[in-house]
Image (cartoon, rainbow, N blue to C red):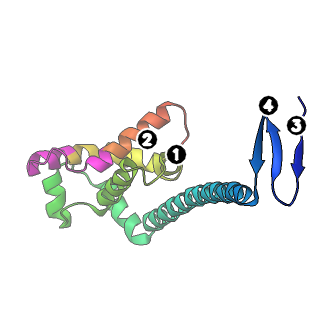
Protein backbone atom coordinates (compact mmCIF):
# COMPACT_ATOMS: atom_id res chain seq x y z
CA UNK A 1 0.00 0.00 0.00
CA UNK A 2 1.36 3.39 -0.95
CA UNK A 3 0.95 6.28 1.50
CA UNK A 4 0.67 9.66 -0.11
CA UNK A 5 1.25 12.72 1.99
CA UNK A 6 0.34 15.97 0.36
CA UNK A 7 0.92 19.29 2.09
CA UNK A 8 -0.64 22.51 0.94
CA UNK A 9 -1.28 25.82 2.63
CA UNK A 10 -4.62 24.74 4.13
CA UNK A 11 -4.13 21.16 5.33
CA UNK A 12 -2.29 17.89 4.82
CA UNK A 13 -4.01 14.73 3.67
CA UNK A 14 -2.55 11.39 4.61
CA UNK A 15 -3.62 7.88 3.88
CA UNK A 16 -3.10 5.88 7.07
CA UNK A 17 -4.30 2.31 7.11
CA UNK A 18 -6.72 3.02 4.30
CA UNK A 19 -8.49 6.05 5.77
CA UNK A 20 -7.92 9.64 4.84
CA UNK A 21 -7.16 12.07 7.65
CA UNK A 22 -6.94 15.80 7.44
CA UNK A 23 -4.18 17.57 9.33
CA UNK A 24 -4.42 21.29 9.66
CA UNK A 25 -1.88 23.59 11.30
CA UNK A 26 -3.51 23.48 14.80
CA UNK A 27 -3.57 19.65 14.72
CA UNK A 28 0.07 19.44 13.75
CA UNK A 29 0.94 22.02 16.43
CA UNK A 30 -0.87 19.93 19.06
CA UNK A 31 1.02 16.79 18.05
CA UNK A 32 4.37 18.61 18.17
CA UNK A 33 3.47 20.09 21.59
CA UNK A 34 2.53 16.65 22.95
CA UNK A 35 5.79 15.19 21.67
CA UNK A 36 7.66 18.05 23.33
CA UNK A 37 5.96 17.33 26.64
CA UNK A 38 6.90 13.63 26.39
CA UNK A 39 10.53 14.52 25.68
CA UNK A 40 10.49 16.93 28.63
CA UNK A 41 9.10 14.28 30.97
CA UNK A 42 11.70 11.75 29.82
CA UNK A 43 14.53 14.24 30.40
CA UNK A 44 13.14 15.12 33.84
CA UNK A 45 13.01 11.45 34.86
CA UNK A 46 16.61 10.96 33.73
CA UNK A 47 17.68 14.06 35.66
CA UNK A 48 15.92 12.87 38.82
CA UNK A 49 17.68 9.51 38.60
CA UNK A 50 21.01 11.29 38.29
CA UNK A 51 20.12 13.51 41.26
CA UNK A 52 19.32 10.46 43.41
CA UNK A 53 22.67 8.89 42.51
CA UNK A 54 24.45 12.15 43.29
CA UNK A 55 22.77 12.42 46.69
CA UNK A 56 23.65 8.81 47.52
CA UNK A 57 27.24 9.51 46.51
CA UNK A 58 27.34 12.62 48.71
CA UNK A 59 25.90 10.65 51.62
CA UNK A 60 28.37 7.80 51.36
CA UNK A 61 31.25 10.26 50.95
CA UNK A 62 30.19 12.05 54.13
CA UNK A 63 29.87 8.76 55.99
CA UNK A 64 33.31 7.67 54.84
CA UNK A 65 34.70 11.03 55.94
CA UNK A 66 33.35 10.40 59.44
CA UNK A 67 34.64 6.85 59.44
CA UNK A 68 38.14 7.89 58.42
CA UNK A 69 38.40 10.69 60.99
CA UNK A 70 40.96 10.31 63.76
CA UNK A 71 38.32 10.63 66.50
CA UNK A 72 36.16 7.89 65.05
CA UNK A 73 39.14 5.60 64.47
CA UNK A 74 40.26 6.02 68.10
CA UNK A 75 36.78 5.28 69.45
CA UNK A 76 36.42 2.32 67.10
CA UNK A 77 39.78 0.96 68.26
CA UNK A 78 38.75 1.40 71.89
CA UNK A 79 35.54 -0.51 71.26
CA UNK A 80 37.21 -3.28 69.29
CA UNK A 81 39.92 -3.86 71.91
CA UNK A 82 37.54 -3.75 74.89
CA UNK A 83 37.63 -6.96 76.89
CA UNK A 84 34.04 -6.95 78.09
CA UNK A 85 30.94 -8.00 76.18
CA UNK A 86 28.65 -6.52 78.82
CA UNK A 87 26.86 -3.31 77.88
CA UNK A 88 26.57 -1.93 81.42
CA UNK A 89 30.26 -2.52 82.17
CA UNK A 90 31.31 -0.78 78.94
CA UNK A 91 28.92 2.12 79.52
CA UNK A 92 30.21 2.77 83.03
CA UNK A 93 33.87 2.36 82.09
CA UNK A 94 33.75 4.70 79.07
CA UNK A 95 30.96 7.01 80.29
CA UNK A 96 28.89 6.73 77.15
CA UNK A 97 25.30 5.60 76.74
CA UNK A 98 25.96 4.10 73.31
CA UNK A 99 29.37 3.71 71.67
CA UNK A 100 29.66 6.25 68.82
CA UNK A 101 30.80 3.53 66.43
CA UNK A 102 27.59 1.61 67.17
CA UNK A 103 25.54 4.73 66.44
CA UNK A 104 27.42 5.21 63.18
CA UNK A 105 26.82 1.69 61.89
CA UNK A 106 23.24 1.72 63.22
CA UNK A 107 22.64 4.89 61.17
CA UNK A 108 23.97 3.21 58.03
CA UNK A 109 21.59 0.30 58.67
CA UNK A 110 18.61 2.64 59.04
CA UNK A 111 19.54 4.47 55.83
CA UNK A 112 19.86 1.13 54.09
CA UNK A 113 16.47 -0.05 55.35
CA UNK A 114 14.91 3.11 53.89
CA UNK A 115 16.78 2.53 50.61
CA UNK A 116 18.56 5.85 50.90
CA UNK A 117 21.94 4.22 50.47
CA UNK A 118 23.17 1.48 48.15
CA UNK A 119 24.01 -1.89 49.75
CA UNK A 120 26.68 -2.75 47.17
CA UNK A 121 28.48 0.53 47.78
CA UNK A 122 28.28 0.16 51.56
CA UNK A 123 29.64 -3.36 51.23
CA UNK A 124 32.53 -2.24 49.03
CA UNK A 125 33.51 0.54 51.42
CA UNK A 126 32.71 -0.92 54.85
CA UNK A 127 31.71 -4.58 54.39
CA UNK A 128 34.70 -6.27 56.00
CA UNK A 129 34.93 -3.65 58.73
CA UNK A 130 31.24 -3.93 59.56
CA UNK A 131 31.32 -7.71 59.78
CA UNK A 132 34.36 -7.62 62.08
CA UNK A 133 32.63 -4.96 64.15
CA UNK A 134 29.48 -7.10 64.34
CA UNK A 135 31.41 -10.03 65.83
CA UNK A 136 32.42 -7.78 68.71
CA UNK A 137 29.20 -5.73 68.94
CA UNK A 138 26.60 -8.52 68.80
CA UNK A 139 27.09 -9.82 72.38
CA UNK A 140 27.15 -6.25 73.74
CA UNK A 141 24.06 -5.34 71.73
CA UNK A 142 22.20 -8.35 73.10
CA UNK A 143 23.34 -7.45 76.63
CA UNK A 144 22.11 -3.87 76.15
CA UNK A 145 18.73 -5.06 74.88
CA UNK A 146 18.28 -7.19 78.00
CA UNK A 147 19.49 -4.53 80.44
CA UNK A 148 17.46 -1.73 78.84
CA UNK A 149 14.46 -3.97 78.13
CA UNK A 150 14.54 -2.71 74.53
CA UNK A 151 14.32 -5.70 72.14
CA UNK A 152 14.69 -3.47 69.03
CA UNK A 153 17.62 -1.43 70.37
CA UNK A 154 20.32 -1.25 67.68
CA UNK A 155 18.12 -2.86 65.03
CA UNK A 156 19.78 -0.78 62.28
CA UNK A 157 23.18 -2.31 63.03
CA UNK A 158 21.72 -5.80 63.06
CA UNK A 159 19.83 -5.17 59.81
CA UNK A 160 22.98 -3.79 58.16
CA UNK A 161 25.04 -6.82 59.11
CA UNK A 162 22.30 -9.21 58.02
CA UNK A 163 22.06 -7.58 54.59
CA UNK A 164 25.84 -7.51 54.09
CA UNK A 165 26.08 -11.14 55.16
CA UNK A 166 23.41 -12.12 52.61
CA UNK A 167 25.23 -10.16 49.91
CA UNK A 168 28.59 -11.70 50.77
CA UNK A 169 27.12 -15.20 50.71
CA UNK A 170 26.29 -14.60 47.04
CA UNK A 171 30.00 -14.13 46.40
CA UNK A 172 30.17 -10.34 46.25
CA UNK A 173 33.48 -9.01 47.55
CA UNK A 174 33.64 -6.45 50.32
CA UNK A 175 36.02 -3.70 51.35
- The rendered magenta stretch, by its main secondary structure, is classed as helix
Q: Which residues are magenta?
A: 142-158
User: How far across and how far down the image is residue 137, in percent?
Assistant: 29, 48
Q: Residue at x 49, y 47 (%)?
A: 123
Name the front one of labels 3 and 1.
3
Q: Report how far apart the C-alphas of labels 2 and 1 lie in the structure.
A: 8 Å
First in sequence: mark 2 or mark 1?
1
Q: Report how far apart the C-alphas of labels 3 and 4 lie in the structure.
A: 9 Å
Q: Of the numbered discs in the image, which one, if any, rests on residue 3?
A: 3
Residue labelled with disc 4:
18
Residue labelled with disc 2:
164
Quarter where residue 50 is shown: bottom right
Crowd around label 2: few <14 · some 14–19 · many ≥20 (10 Å): many
Residue labelled with disc 1:
120
Crowd around label 1: few <14 · some 14–19 · many ≥20 (10 Å): some
Farthest residue in the front direction?
10
Amino acid sequence: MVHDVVFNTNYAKSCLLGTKMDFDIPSISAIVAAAGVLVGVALTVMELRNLVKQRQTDLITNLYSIYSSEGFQKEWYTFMTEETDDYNTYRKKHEVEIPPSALFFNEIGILLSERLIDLHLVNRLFGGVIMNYWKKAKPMLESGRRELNQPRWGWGLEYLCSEIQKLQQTGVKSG
